[in-house]
Amino acid sequence: MKLVTFTDSTNKPRAGWLTADATGVVDMHRISNGALPVDMLSFIDDHERYMALIQANNWRSLPATHAIADVTLLAPLPNPRSFRDYIGFEQHLKNASSKFGHQVAPEWYEMPIFYFTNHQAIYGPGQNIPRPARETRMDYELEMGCIIGKAGRNIPADQADAYIFGYTIFNDFTARAIQGKEMKCNLGPAKGKDFANAIGPYIVTKDELEPTRDETGRFNVRMASRINGQPICNGNFNTIHYTFGQMMERASENDVMLHPGDIIGSGTVGWGSLIETNFEAHRPLEPGDVVELEIDGLGILKNQIV
């Protein structure tokens, strides 16, 4: 199931899903006569009950309420409760660390590392991304986002799947010039990561990615990026070092509660950012540039820099 948040002629955000052929959108509140909620966060909060209603009433077989051409897709979850972003891919960490003059800390191999990013700076597919004032080294980062579907604390990695709602594409836009100065102070990225987190174009429920798991339990899905149509990265999610289960175990330990609607970022796939080649693969992002991220099964997330 591919879940979306959209606006129609009323300009009011609505929650729904794509039709099987992706040519239409179903307004879940409208087709259920109010039994399903208007917004995505409310749907995720009680999604097990709502999914049972959808199945019992066969609502997924109903025709679209809108043609896809008549709506504007927004971030599928415009208001996540929190947003943790990890550094899950070893190749990216090695590449990026060397460009900042750092070495990979041995502690990274002991535990997955994350920071809290701005869960209020959420952008969706097709939305323009403003370049921060005076930023000279703006970058993109190709990641997968995991949406939490059930509250829990002290979640063991091997039980984490029961707490996952679904997945989406995540572009962790980064101001590298700002970040470079900040990280010299040993407090990690802050303003360099504060201005834009793009997700979308939809949330895929976790059952849809299950057939892609390999023997290690990781998703064998291609991850690609393009800038102005030029291919930049062609990677695979199965190269990730830490699984989402391990990330959730780390986030929820010491009695920390994870909530429905929290997002966890995977970190950037190897070569999935410009800093990794010191901007030799492409110059820093400038107004007018169009960035496309594609992950098999999760669609294409496209944004323009302004």
Image (tube, rainbow, N blue to C red):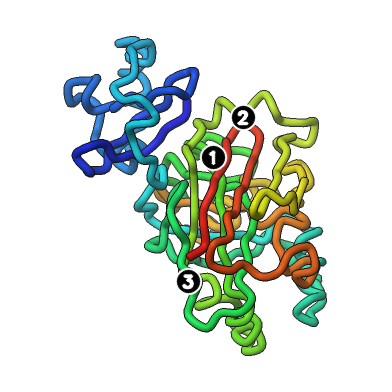
x and y percent of residue 285 in the render?
A: 61, 67
119, 66: nearer the viewer: 66
Residue for point 60% across, 54% down: 291
- Taking 245 as reference, is 132 left or right? left
Amino acid at the residue labelled 2? Leu
Vertical relation: 219 (above or below) 32? below
In the structure shown, which secondary structural element does the residue marked by tag 2 occupy? loop
Residue for point 48% across, 65% down: 306
Question: Is the residue under label 2 in contact with that under label 1 (CB below 8 Å)?
Answer: yes
Vertical relation: 306 (above or below) 98? above
- Taking 56 as reference, is 166 left or right? right
Residue 40 quadrant? top left
Res. 105 visible in picture: no
For marks 1 and 3, the one nearer the N-term is 1
- What is the number of the mark on residue 167? 1
x and y percent of residue 205 in the render?
A: 50, 31
User: Pointer 2: what residue?
Assistant: 209
Question: Is the residue under label 3 in contact with that under label 1 (CB below 8 Å)?
Answer: no
Q: Tell me the distance, in whole angstroms, between the alpha carbons under discs 1 and 2.
A: 8 Å
- Taking 156 as reference, is 76 left or right? left
Vertical relation: 64 (above or below) 267? above
